[in-house]
Amino acid sequence: MSIAAVGVALGCCHCTELPTEVGEHVSYHWDDSEARLCGGTVPTVDRFLETVGGHYGWAPDELGPGVEYFWDEELSVNACSWPGTFNCESGMNRPIVFSNAPIETHELAHTSRGGHGRPILGFPPFINEAFASRWSSAVIEHGQAFLTWPEFLSAAELRAALEVNDANKLEYGLAFTWWVALESTYGPNKMAEFIVEVDGATSANDVERALRRVFGISLAESAALAESLPEASIDDPVCELEGLPTFTWTGRPLVVERSDAHCDDGDIVNLGHDNTGWLFALELPDTLTDYYVSLTLPPGVDPATKAMYLVECHGELEFDNPFPYNAAFADGKVQSGPWRLQGRQVGRLSTDMNPDGAVVLSRVVFERVLTDADRPMPP
C-alpha cells in the first residue's frame, strides 16, 4: 500500500535516535531496543531491489535515489494513515518505507520503477498495487503466494477500478491478475516499456493510451486477456535472487545444512522481531520425483519455530495448484507423505534466534523414494 506523503517526525518521537545501516540502495533504520538487526538483512533488501529492477532490464545504477526503510512498530503505526495498517510507502523525492516487518517486499516493490510512478503524480493505485503484489515474496514474508483470479472484471469494471484513488477500495488479487496476464503474454521487456509509457498516468484513458502504444490492445482487450487466465501462480521473487547457496542433486541423499549460524552472519536475515532465516536453492532433476524430507536438530534443541518453506521456480505460470509451495516443521507437523519435486527450488530455513544471537537451524535431508525400477530383478 502506498501513501502520498508523510512527515517522519510526526510518526515517531525517537526516529532521530534510530541506528542506521547504509546499503547500496537502502538506508535502513531500526529500533535496536526492540530487535537485533542480522547481518544479511540489508544486503537482502539491496538484492531484492536489484532483482525487481533487473527483471525489467534496469541496471543497479538506474534504480533511482535509493530507499529509506524504517523497521519500527511505533513509526509504522503512526505513519501509515489507514486503521490497522502497519506497512506503507511514501513516494516522495526519496522513497520511504515504514513497516513493522524487517523486509516488507510489497512496500519495497512500491519504491521501484513501476510501483509508484513519478513523485506526486504516480500511477493509478490499481497499477501500483498490481505491481507490488506481483513482487510480494511469500518466502520472505511468511505468507501464502498470490494466485490469479479465474473470474476477472468486465471492461467497464476495469475502467472504474483504474479511476479509484483509494487503494483500500481495491481487490489486490484482481490487480495482480491483470499485471500477470500482461507480463506472461508480452514478457518483461515489453512490460518495461509499459512502465515507462504509463508513468504519470492519472486516469483509465491514460492507461488505455499506454496499452495501445506498447501492446496494441485496448483496455477491454486487456480485461479479456486477464479473464482468459485460469487460476495460476508465478515464481516467487526469491527465485530470481542471485548468489544463493545452491545444493545440487547427485543421486545420493541431499543434505541442506547451515550450522553454527549467528544473527551477525552476512547470510542470516531477519524475518520478524525474533525470527530469522537463511535462504538457499536446490537443483533437482527435471523429472517429477518423490522425495522423503526430514528435519532434524542437535539433541536438546527445542523444535518449536524451526521450519522450512520451499517453492518451485518454474520460469512460467503454474496452473491447477492452489498451494505452490511446501512447508515442513522440525516438530513433525504438516509433514505427511513424500514431496513431489522437480527442477530449481528456492526456500528458507527459519527459527527464532537465541538471546545471544545464535541461530540454530534444522538439518534437512532429501531422499528419493525408491520405485520398482530401483529393486533388483529376481534371478
Image (tube, rainbow, N blue to C red):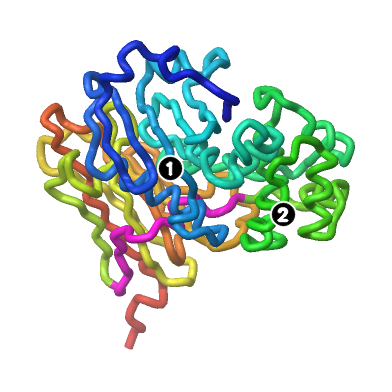
The stretch of residues the image draws in magenta is: 233-251
Q: Indicate yes or no whether the magenta region holds residue 234.
A: yes
Q: Quadrant of residue 252?
A: bottom left
Rendered-image quadrant of the N terminus:
top right
Quick check: 275 left or right of 224? left
Distance from label 1 to label 2 (Cα)? 28 Å
The numbered disc on residue 182 is 2
- Name the amino acid, label 2: Leu
The numbered disc on residue 197 is none
Q: Residue at x 27, y 40 (%)?
A: 330
Specify the farthest residue to the front: 93
Report the front residue among 176 and 1: 1
Q: Residue at x 38, y 14 (%)?
A: 12
Percent position of residue 277, x then y: 29, 42
Task: Give the label, 1 or 2, closer to the camera.
Answer: 1
Q: Residue at x 23, y 45 (%)?
A: 362
- Name the amino acid, label 1: Gly
Specify the farthest residue to the bottom: 379
Q: Indicate yes or no whether the magenta region holds residue 204.
A: no
Q: Secondary structure beneath disc 1?
A: loop
Q: Find disc 1 in the rendering and name its residue.
A: 66
Rendered-image quadrant of the C terminus:
bottom left
